[in-house]
Amino acid sequence: MDSSLRITTNFMWVYAFQGGYPRIAAVHDEIVWTFPKGAKGIYLGDSTSYMAWMDCAAARKGLLRPGSYTADAGSGPTEDPNTMLDPGHGLDIKDNCA
């Protein structure tokens, strides 16, 4: 029997920028946090995420900069790029920086 509490969070970060196109970049995260019984602290159990409209070179350096939507972001070339901003969008896709 597992004696820990697990909490799953699913959230989206949307960053707005002034000027340029697009003016936003987004990161969609699902994180499982584990609280072991009797232990002090919280532990990262598992995480899944994708980035949309993010400048990939900047992201690899830990920076935020809007980039462009690419059709190979996962679901195919017919997917509306705006669906990437839906927090209900599945996480089983490849982000545009993979």
Image (cartoon, rainbow, N blue to C red):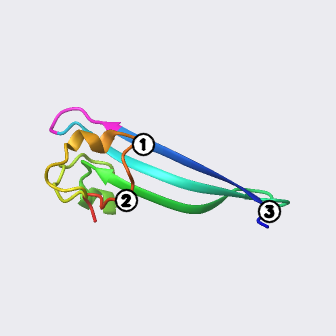
**Residue drawn at point x = 18 percent, y = 33 percent:** 19
User: At which x and y percent is residue 73?
Assistant: 23, 57
Say which of 94 and 24 sits in front. 94
Which mark sits nearer the N-terminus, 2 or 1? 1
Mark-to-mark CA distance, 3 and 1:
30 Å
Q: Nearer the viewer, mark 3 or mark 1?
A: 3
Snapshot quadrant of residue 15: top left
Disc 2: which residue: 92
State if disc 1 and disc 2 touch (CB < 8 Å): no
Q: Is residue 7 left or right of residue 94?
A: right
Q: Is residue 19 above or below residue 71?
A: above
Which mark sits nearer the N-terminus, 3 or 1? 3
State if disc 3 and disc 2 touch (CB < 8 Å): no
Q: From which residue to which does the magenta span run?
A: 15-21
Residue 91: numbered disc: none
**Residue drawn at point x = 40 percent, y = 48 percent:** 28
Mark-to-mark CA distance, 2 and 3:
29 Å
Residue 12: numbered disc: 1
User: At which x and y percent is residue 60?
Assistant: 32, 63
**Residue drawn at point x = 45 percent, y = 51 percent:** 29
Magenta region, main secondary structure: loop
**Kind of residue at disc 1:** Met
Snapshot quadrant of residue 61: bottom left
Disc 3: which residue: 3
